[in-house]
Amino acid sequence: MDFFKGQDSLTALEWVVRSIVGFVFLIIAAKMMGQRSISQLRFLDFIIALTLGNIIAHPLSDEHLGLKGALISTFSLVLLYTAAIWLSLKIPLLKKLFDPPAIPLVLDGKLDYRNLSRAKLPIEFLYAELRKANVEDISKVAFAAWEPGGTLSVFLNTAYQPVTPADLKLTTQPFNLTKPIITDGHMEHALLREIGKDRVWLETEIRPHELYNVILATVDGKLTVQVHVVREPRTP
């Protein structure tokens, strides 16, 4: 356990073990913080990401620094992060601090220069984001807002929105979700249990293909199995 402490020098094995411990610990810390911390970074997420990166990076690159203090500091910050998220759900003032509301930038085709300045965005950047949303004319935008996660939400005026079957009062088929049931020759046991089927049923559905040769197969809500990609048969 000497690799936890600062040393004059570390052996190659101790460097490897220290890296493995740091890597596993960061995975555990990320799981404790939840999915939000690895999606679009918000204010609090950005701060915690920078801090954790600095704390763990130094002992992983400097043998004179111990790993124990870095792990304790990281665990403490994860607890503080979790507490801050929980408190922000209970205290509106903290919620506004950690998760500020979206900033409206366009309303009824008119640009709000004041809010654009609040968001610290140049007009060129706004137009670039509109082009990404396939909007070529700002006058077509009913509402656009800069989200805390660093993305632009764009809603077109109804006159420029695509026509849907509901607009034309057409009859449509119910939504049918397709899920992968075989990936790279391995069946998804949890999905099989969910739909109430077993391996024998699945192997019957994918015939004449063998299970280990199927790279991708899917099943829909009607229990229809489709084989999409099959591995090339091995030549002797």
Image (spheres, rainbow, N blue to C red):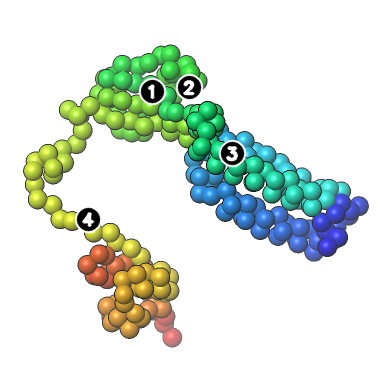
Q: CA distance from mark 4 to mark 3?
A: 39 Å
Local packing at callout 4 (Cα closer than 10 Å; few below 14, some 14-19, many 20+) is: few
The answer to which of marks 4 and 1 sits earlier in the sequence is 1
The label on residue 175 is 4
Local packing at callout 1 (Cα closer than 10 Å; few below 14, some 14-19, many 20+) is: some
Location of mark 2 (residue): 119
Location of mark 1 (residue): 104
Q: Is 226 placed above or below 2 here? A: below
Location of mark 3 (residue): 84
Residue 175: x percent and y percent?
22, 55
In the image, which is nearer the foreground, mark 1 or mark 3?
A: 3
- Residue placed at 43% from the left, 31% from the top? 147
Lateral position of residue 155 relative to residue 115, left or right: left
Tell me the element at label 1: strand
User: Which amino acid is tagged 3?
Assistant: Ala
Q: Label 2 near label 4: C-beta < 8 Å?
A: no
Where does the N terminus fall, quadrant-wise?
bottom right
**How many numbered marks appear?**
4
The answer to which of marks 4 and 3 sits earlier in the sequence is 3
- Residue placed at 53% from the left, 46% from the top? 38
Residue 212 in sight in this render: yes
Q: CA distance from mark 3 to mark 2?
A: 24 Å
User: Which amino acid is tagged 2?
Assistant: Ala
Q: Label 1 near label 4: C-beta < 8 Å?
A: no
Residue 220: x percent and y percent?
26, 65
The answer to which of marks 2 and 1 sits earlier in the sequence is 1
Extreme residue toward the right, this view: 8
Q: Is 212 placed above or below 224 here? A: below
Answer with the quarter of the image where residue 127 lies.
top left
